Amino acid sequence: MAENLRDYRRRIKSVRNTVQLTKAMKMVAAAKLRRSQEAMLAARPYSAALGRVLVEVSRRAHPELHPLLAARPEKKVDLIVCTGDRGLAGAFNTNILKAAELWRAERERAGIRVEVTPVGRKANDYFRRRPSIPTRRGPTEVFRGLTFDLARDIAADFEQRFVEGETDGVFIAFNEFRSVIAQKVTVQPILPLAELVGEQPDGYEPSQSDYIYEPAPEKLLGHLLTRYVAFRMYHALLESAAAENAARMSAMENATRNGEEMIGKLTLQMNRVRQAAITKEIIEVVSGAQALEG
């Protein structure tokens, strides 16, 4: 009986230590989530302004001359798959990998070759174990210090591949942040930017004034398009970072709650065992006393 009590005490101590760990991880994830949300909110005005400028410049340039705006039949496309570098985030990584596989299989059935570029350690490990899938080596530890310069470097590689004809389109699969408890898996096109031609963002009013451009509108359009591609990449990575932190915070909160419930159940069982042991000892003492009296 004493062995059973010691086992219960060891299990309760182990679960209590785990609960302390999950509480700490939840607090860390909450702090990171707040910073991620602030970065997303700060990026939205810039994104809206950049879209308006692009539309304004494209009205005065010849967008058909720029290669990033040239749509062509898809024979080979790139798919960037964004996951985290670590687990303990519920189904965050699993959901994005499943969605990427379904999207890739659909394109493959249509005769389009898909080459995957994983971003994050979980995605790299997943596709490394599947050599049959065409995969390029992708970066890891991206979300440890996510900056616009890092996103621009990643986008520049795919922009060069698109311009040189190595790929006919670039797509990115990531978890879009909706709320702390909800993330939506999204596959978003990065290149080409053909949909920008003639597009008018919400609240856009064409200017009636004429402008003098320095440099020429065509050259300015090329610079803005490159900037826009990099920012679309950066925005997707920001969304993924915020979604991962939210998923980890929710997972750690659930783990903490389950651990506390387990501690309660184990404590109740231990008390029952201890009470049974005390009752048995009392019965043995009373029985022995009665035997001596008889």
Image (tube, rainbow, N blue to C red):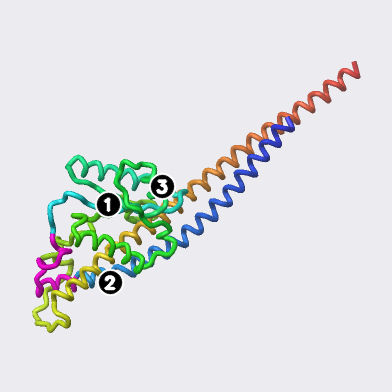
Disc 2: which residue = 46
Q: Nearer the viewer, residue 251 or 196?
A: 196
Instruction: Give me the C-alpha separation between circle 1 and circle 2.
Output: 26 Å
Taking the spot 41% from the left edge, 47% from the top edge, the residue there is: 125
Residue 125 image label: 3
* Residue 25 image position (x, y, % from top left): 52, 55
Q: Would residue 201 be found to the left or right of residue 100 on screen?
A: left
Question: Type of residue at label 3?
Answer: Asp
Instruction: Give me the C-alpha separation between circle 3 and circle 1.
Output: 16 Å
Pointer 3 local density, CA inside 10 Å: few below 14, some 14–19, many at least 20: few
From this viewpoint, which residue is outermost toward the top? 294
Instruction: Give me the C-alpha separation between circle 3 and circle 2.
Output: 35 Å
Of mark 3 and mark 2, the one earlier in the sequence is 2
- Magenta region's main secondary structure? helix
Question: Type of residue at label 1?
Answer: Leu
Residue 79 image label: 1
Image depth: mark 3 or mark 2 in front: 3
Image depth: mark 1 or mark 2 in front: 1
Q: Are marks 1 and 2 in contact (CB under 8 Å)?
A: no
Of mark 1 and mark 2, the one earlier in the sequence is 2
**For residue 169, above or below residue 5:** below
The region drawn magenta spans 52-70
**For residue 176, above or below residue 217:** above
Of mark 3 and mark 1, the one earlier in the sequence is 1
Q: Is mark 1 on a helix, strand or loop?
A: strand
- Verify whether residue 264 appears in magenta: no
Q: Which of 4 and 76 is in front in this view?
A: 76
